[in-house]
Image (spheres, rainbow, N blue to C red):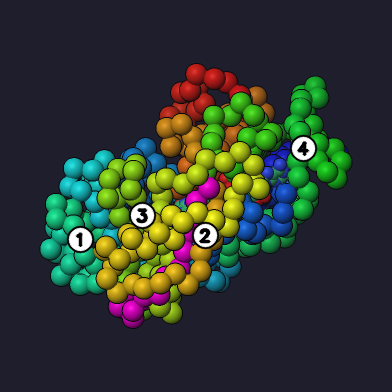
Amino acid sequence: MIYDLIVVGSGSVGSAAGYYAAKAGLKVLMIDNGHPPHDQGSHHGETRLMRHAYGQGEIYVPMVLRAQQLWDELEEQVGERIMHRCGVINIGPNDSEYIRNANESASRYQIPVEMLTAEAVMKRWPQIKVPHGFVGVFEPNAGYLKSEVAIGHFIRLAKEAGCTQLFNCPTTGVTRDGDVQKVETANGVYFGRKLVFSAGTWLTKLLPKLPVQPVRKVFGWYQADDSYNENNKFPGFVFVIKDNESEFYGFPANNNALKVGKHSGGQPINSPEERTPFGAFPEDNGELLDFLHSVFPGTRECIYGKSCTYDMSPDKHFIIHTQPDQLIISGLSGHAFKFASVLGEIAAAFAQNKSSPFDLSPFSLSRFAKPC
Ligand SMILES: Cc1cc2nc3c(=O)[nH]c(=O)nc-3n(C[C@H](O)[C@H](O)[C@H](O)COP(=O)(O)OP(=O)(O)OC[C@H]3O[C@@H](n4cnc5c(N)ncnc54)[C@H](O)[C@@H]3O)c2cc1C
């Protein structure tokens, strides 16, 4: 049997790819090391921010707007809440690249935002301390996605649409056999006309020349007083203290537990075993606690934390690269969960030889010197 599409890695992007391709009537095989959702990839820890006024650059905005439509459709289809529209406040120095990008994305694509001075932010949310010279960009229609819930639905819907699923089964190699893709797994060999590589951080094991560096990251839940709870209208947040060097993000508290992570920094690693648990480094808790106590005075100690991995590309922008019969989606650099739905749709279109409505050329591997 030859599948129309084989999906190597069925986490955030792969689960959506499998679903949209199977829904389009293709014969699809989804493969994964584990049984997604799970905590061995980049999608665990319950929640991921969803922003449209995009701090990483306006080239992402058309895709993120389509992603939002697809999340809304998924939510309606499954009858369960996937997106919490609590709003997101972006805070940073007035001249930071992140704030500039968020503002430019908003004005170019008419995304509703409120530009706030430090004083206006603190008047609205007295529980936030904003450093002098910083500003806020509040996006009321942003919020967060329930990442594991969404993946669970994509996996189930893909199966219902007729997709074959091979889980707890690593892919060990991909070669070409004539004009088909030959995929070797712990369970045997499978063939497909098209293939999408969506194996997250450890795709580097299958494509060693891919310019992607796995980086260990941590996040934790901290005690917070009632004013930080979502039901008291506390928003999600991105705090850029210094572009690329000191960037934090987090979520409104649920039952007085506020989740926070550091987007910048982390430890480059070369094997999954090096992803040691939260607390393995003193700075795991230390950096988050210092940040929280400096800007959210009503927060207290760590309740618990987890570790995770980012797949960093050299320029921190996505890799969405097409080569004959293969699509590589990688280097997602810690900000792609929100795009998982649209990246899945892009993969399904690729498998049907349809061209993408998005300009994907900025994301091609050709921007780097080395082929993979
Ligand atoms: C702590 C943290 C916080 C984040 N916060 C945000 C946020 O707020 N907003 C946002 O948009 N994004 C966020 N991200 C980024 C986002 O979660 C990731 O970019 C996204 O989940 C990556 O999707 P993926 O499909 O590439 O990887 P994954 O979801 O990890 O899926 C990859 C899958 O491939 C499988 N796999 C690996 N190797 C093989 C193999 N050899 N054979 C078969 N299967 C294999 C894995 O088991 C895994 O299931 C965050 C990431 C982390 C770690």
For marks 2 and 3 on the same chain, the one whose residue lies earlier in the sequence: 3
In the rendered image, which residue does mark 4 sit on? 172
In the rendered image, which residue does mark 1 sit on? 130
In the rendered image, the residue lying farthest to the front is: 282
Query: How far is the residue under mark 4 from the one under mark 1?
Result: 49 Å
The residue lying at 51 percent from left, 69 percent from top is: 304
Secondary structure predominantly adopted by residues drawn in magenta: strand
Quadrant where the image shows the N terminus:
top right
Q: Crowding near pointer 4: few (<14 within 10 Å), some, many (20+)? A: some
Three-letter amino acid code of the residue under disc 1: Val
For marks 4 and 1 on the same chain, the one whose residue lies earlier in the sequence: 1
Residue at disc 4, CB closer than 8 Å to ligand 1: yes
Q: Is residue 125 left or right of residue 344?
A: left
> Which of label 2 and label 3 is nearer to you?
2
Position above or below: 96 against 327: below
In the rendered image, which residue does mark 2 sit on? 279
The residue lying at 44 percent from left, 69 percent from top is: 302
